[in-house]
Structures are given as C-alpha cells and as structure tokens.
Amino acid sequence: MKIDIDRSEWPLIIVKWPSGALSDELIEDYLRQSEDDLTRREIHCILHDARGSMGLSAAQRKRFAEHLARHSGTIATWTSGVAIATPSALIRGMITAVNWITGTPCPQKQFATATEACAWLAETYQQKTGKQASFDPRARRAS
C-alpha cells in the first residue's frame, strides 16, 4: 500500500489515497514530500483523490494538523488551492476535524468528483497567478 503522488501535470499535484489504514511511516513520507513541494517556491495546487478511504488514525490527523500549523505561511504563499474529491462523509469529517484545529492556510474545498475539483483548482491557480493553468481540468474522468 502506498500514497501515490503524481506531479506530472505540475503545477497540479494529484495525491491518490489508498483505501484502508495507513502506516505512520507512509504519512511521514507524504508530509516530507509535501515539504519538498513547498521548497520549490512555485505556486501549485493539490488534488487529494480520497475516493477510497484514507483511514487516518487520531494521531495521524493530529500530525497533519501540526504540519499545517508549522508550514501555514509557506502553504499560503505557494499553494493556490487544495481540493478533496470524496463522496465519503467520514472522510469529510476527518478533514473538518483537522481544519478545526489549524484552519486552512489556503483555499480548500471538497467535491464529489475529481473533475469538479480540478476545474476549481484551475480557477484558484488563475486567481493567484493571473495565468491560465497548464493542466486541463476537463481531462479528469468523473467517477
């Protein structure tokens, strides 16, 4: 099991979350990679494809909250938006719990499909940079 991070359409980063419980090592690896993305000092946006179950434990949700708090300023500067594609009320609840603790350093919105999420991310990218996003939001398959 792994968290698949696709940067092939930069400035769009697509994070595909597997179903089931994730190890703390996988979460720490994801957070390290997220920090690496921020050190590029390029505006980007993130699509979390969480249509499977993220399966985060309370300790892992706390770790995400700490990460967001520690990097809040950098995230606000370099991330134009974060979209979460999930039909799951459970996942939306976990995301809400993390956001209650730290707030969101950049625009964040939840969607039922990756297509809708990607279209919104293209808008947030254009609003922040004044440039049209180089990725095609219509290329996403709604599912």
Image (tube, rainbow, N blue to C red):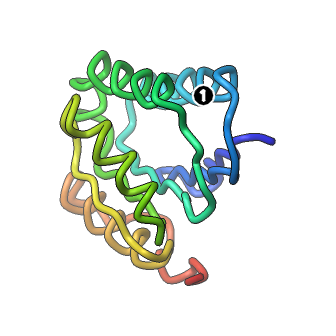
From the viewer's perspective, is 112 left or right of 19? left
Position in image of residue 96 (x %, y %): 28, 47
Name the residue: 30% across, 52% down. 81
Residue type highlighted by circle 1:
Ile
Q: Which of these two is toward me, 119 or 114?
A: 114
Q: Which of these two is toward me, 73 or 70?
A: 70
Name the residue: 22% across, 29% down. 102
Q: Secondary structure at mark 1?
A: helix
What residue would you read off at disc 1? 27
Query: Which residue of the protein is positioned furthest toward the right in this rendering?
Result: 1
Instruction: Say if 125 sits above or below 76 in the image.
Output: below
Position in image of residue 129 (x %, y %): 24, 52
From the viewer's perspective, is 38 left or right of 49? left
- Total marks shown come to 1
From the viewer's perspective, is 37 left or right of 6? left
Position in image of residue 26 (x %, y %): 68, 28
Q: Which of these two is toward me, 79 or 51?
A: 51
Instruction: Say if 117 sits above or below 83 in the image.
Output: below
Name the residue: 57% across, 65% down. 51
Q: Quadrant of the C terminus?
A: bottom right
Q: Which of these two is toward me, 4 or 132?
A: 4
Position in image of residue 10 (x %, y %): 53, 51
For disc 1, the neighbor class at 10 Å (few under 14, some 14 to 19, many from 20) is some
Q: Quadrant of the N terminus?
A: top right
